[in-house]
Image (cartoon, helix red, strand yellow):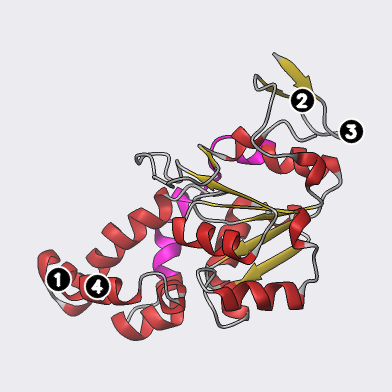
Amino acid sequence: MASYRFAPGLPIFEHPMKHTIVDWAQIDTVMLDMDGTILDLHFDNEFWTQHLPRRYAEHHQLGLDESNKRLAPVFSENAGQLNWYCTDFWADITGLDIIALKHEIAELIGPLPGALEFLQAVQASGRPIWLVTNAHRGSVDLKLQRTGLGHYFEHIVSSHDFGYAKEAPEFWQALVKAFPVQRERALFVDDSPAVVAAAVDYGIGQVVALSHPDSRGGVREHGHNVVGERLVDLLPVG
């Protein structure tokens, strides 16, 4: 087992990997997705597939089957679009306070195994970390308050700031215009196949897809992209 000692005051993390899937010598900036990359996607899956349909049924005095029947086509029509990630959009569609509903199950919000160790290692290396997420600002604020991870990030970017989801090339153009970065020397990590493809197409230097975004879910397939199970698989940071 190799030891990697972080900056003073940070814990020692023991990691068995001798090699990493990232060429850290070529990385100056680290950009990370939030849900399914740093944080356990179990919260979001539980919210959208279980909690929201139940509360929608209660609010509109429907059976659960009817609630799911009404919500399913709206989910399908907006998947991968900015509206899918917009709490205001879903509040209008459902008549519910989406952020308040998220607070109801906020105890499920937490980092994936190894995520904290990864953030500590990158921070200790001196590389800036950007949080680059499709989540709406209200959701971002809730999750960072709940986890206390906000201090790791030089920039906290929501796709709603630019009006395009990360799946769109316009998002990446707007991101680099707002926060100039040498994209060839950047690392981006995400669990969404569509977002990973967009980052690759835009020319981000190294892009890694994560295959286990939900601690209670199965493996996500990513085709021929560079894949790790979780952030911890990108250690050690050189």
Could you say which quadrant of the image residue 236 lies in? top right
x, y percentage for residue 80?
Answer: 41, 70
Q: Mark 4 highlights which residue?
A: 56
Could you say which quadrant of the image residue 8 lies in? top right
Residue 179, placed above or below residue 199: below
Residue extending farthest to the top is 1
Q: Mark 2 highlights which residue?
A: 12
| Disc 1 from disc 4: Cα separation | 11 Å
Disc nearer the start of the sequence (4/3): 3
Disc nearer the start of the sequence (4/2): 2
Residue 169, placed above or below residue 10: below
- Residue bounds of the magenta highlight: 100-117
Circle 4: residue type? Tyr
1 or 3: mark nearer the eye: 1
Name the element at disc 2: loop
x, y percentage for residue 222?
Answer: 44, 47
Disc nearer the start of the sequence (1/4): 4
Query: Residue at point 53% right, 47% down?
Result: 209
| Label disc, if present, on residue 79 of the rendered structure | none
27 or 203, nearer to the observer: 203
Disc nearer the start of the sequence (1/2): 2
Q: Residues within 10 Å of mark 1 (few under 14, many from 20)?
A: few
Q: Mark 3 highlights which residue?
A: 8
Q: Is residue 101 magenta?
A: yes
| Disc 4 from disc 3: Cα separation | 49 Å
| Disc 1 from disc 3: Cα separation | 54 Å
| Disc 4 from disc 2: Cα separation | 46 Å
Quadrant of the image containing the N terminus = top right
Q: Mark 1 highlights which residue?
A: 69
